[in-house]
Amino acid sequence: MSVIGAVVASLRPKQWVKNLFVFAGVIFSQQLFTPLFWPALGAFALFCVLSGSMYLLNDVADAEKDRLHPTKRFRPVASGALPRGGALALGIGLLVASLVASFALSWRFGLVAAGYGVLLTAYSVWLKHLVILDVLAVAVGFVLRAVAGAVAIDVEISGWLLICTVLIALFLAVGKRRHEYLTLHGNAAAHRPILAEYSEGFLDQMIAVVTASTVTAYALYTMSPETVAKFHTRLLPLTLPFVLYGIFRYLYLLYRRQLGGNPSDLLLNDRALLLNTVLWMLSLLVLIYAPWAR
């Protein structure tokens, strides 16, 4: 692997799909097809650079433990394809550059971006070693993405939308923990000590709670008087079948196919899940933006 290839791999571009939550503000404020799309796109790009820098720094910090993991040992820093010193310098450089550019875009956006960086740092150093708080921290990271997209274009974001974001993020994070717990078997605690505090049954209970909560929260959001008044349509519940299928498909892949260790890869590689997500988004756009749907 070339140095450039190692750097690109370490930035984890496939993980940038998580930063699509930045577009929640511009989509649900009905500003997607206005000039406000461009600062939203800039916010997305900055979060990609920011998250990429944090991935690099995290790989440097976790290089020794990653070598014990069946798949993470192939990461460029853990495998030695990318020197730790070079990865550290590049990570710091990208972090500083992304934060400076974030404050240049908007001081409020800069504060959220800085908070996101602090959260990821706290997660790498401390929070990932605390049971339950480790997955909650991941969920907060998704919320900060959505909030960042809203403040970048100076619009409000629905509390319902933030609740749904927290719940779907918890669903993915707990599913990932379950996959790690079962995949690593007896070496789980050696790679990620906090896994010793979990059990398969406990993780299954957590998944059951967040699954039911996610579906309920989304259904209530689509039918709430606030949502109906904002979008001037009562048809948003028609998107609920896509949400149900997406969750059930993910659970199928998690429990029957023993997948789920990398939610981003799963979304991009599973055609049924990807197609369902695209159809859900298209249906939302039609119902929110098309005049005849109101």
Image (cartoon, rainbow, N blue to C red):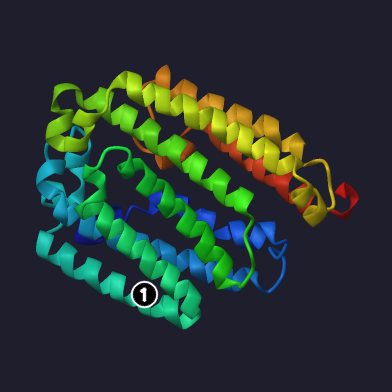
Q: Residue furthest bottom?
A: 104
Give the x, y percent position of residue 33.
72, 65
| 71 lies above or below 123 | above
Taking depth in this image into account, of 286 and 136 the one nearest to the observer is 136
Give the total of numbered labels.
1
Left or right placement of residue 89 versus residue 151 in this view: left
Horizontal side of 92 relative to 169 (left or right) equals left
Residue at position x 21%, y 60% from top? 57
- The crowding category of the residue bearing disc 1, from other C-alpha atoms within 10 Å (few below 14, some 14 to 19, many at least 20), is many
Q: Residue at x 50, y 68 (%)?
A: 43
Give x and y (percent) for residue 75: 21, 46
Q: Which amino acid type is marked by label 1? A: Leu
The residue nearer to you, when weighing 193 against 276, is 193
Give the residue displayed 58% in from the left and 65% down from the top: 150
Is residue 192 visible from the viewing direction of this image? no
**The image quarter in which residue 151 lies:** bottom right
State the residue position of label 1. Answer: 99
Q: Is residue 67 above or below residue 25?
A: above
Percent position (x, y) of residue 277? 60, 39
Q: Residue furthest right?
A: 292
Residue 28 visible from this viewpoint: yes
Q: Is 192 or 33 nearer to us in this picture?
A: 192
**SS assignment at label 1:** helix
- The location of residue 286, given as percent across then percent down, is 77, 48
Q: Residue at x 11, y 59 (%)?
A: 83
Judge left or right: residue 266 versus residue 275: left
